[in-house]
Image (tube, rainbow, N blue to C red):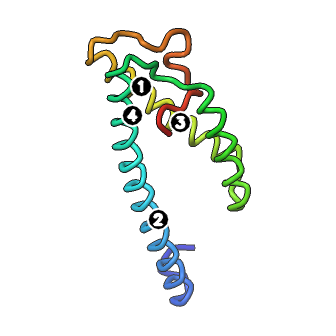
Amino acid sequence: MSTSEIDASVQAELNRLRESIDNIDAAVVHMLAERFKATQQVGRLKADHRLPPADPARETRQIGRLRQLAQSANLDPAFAEKLLNFIIAEVIRHHERIADEAGNGDTGGPTAGTTGAVTGA
């Protein structure tokens, strides 16, 4: 069935729902931008004080917290964890770059670069 064959009321509802999805996507992007602004500040603070880019204990707490939030929001906790792990990996990469730029080199020891550590999440 082509778009031209869809009932006008169905098309209107589809358009309304898609507009809502587009608004949500925009909000997600803006929220991620704000989150990364904060984690960049955490990365600079860590670099200034020669702290490791990764914090596995915080990661464990954050994953548990996020899984509980996801479950209460009727979102698949495994999906939420995968998403957070993806974000965490990017944050760690940023923190490692900031540490390198600060001349601290690899300040993370054996956990630097792991995809599981939350740094400022």
- Residue type indicated by callout 1: Arg
Q: Are marks 3 and 2 in contact (CB under 8 Å)?
A: no
Relative horizontal placement of residue 50, taking residue 120 as reference (left or right): left
Determine crowd level at label 4: few under 14, some 14-19, many 20+ residues with C-alpha closer than 10 A. some
Q: Are marks 4 and 2 in contact (CB under 8 Å)?
A: no
Mark 4 or mark 2, whichever is nearer to me = 4
Q: Earlier in the sequence, mark 4 or mark 2?
A: 2
The disc placed on residue 108 is: none
Read off the residue under disc 4.
42
The disc placed on residue 86 is: 3
Q: Secondary structure at mark 3?
A: helix
Q: Are marks 3 and 4 in contact (CB under 8 Å)?
A: no
- Residue type indicated by callout 4: Val
Q: Residue at horizontal 56%, vertical 27%?
A: 117
- Residue type indicated by callout 3: Phe
Q: Secondary structure at mark 2?
A: helix
Vertically, is 22 above or below 96? below
Query: Percent from the top left, x then y, of residue 55?
Result: 54, 26
Determine crowd level at label 3: few under 14, some 14-19, many 20+ residues with C-alpha closer than 10 A. few
Asked where in the image residue 94 lies, by quadrant, the reply is top left
Q: Are marks 4 and 1 in contact (CB under 8 Å)?
A: no
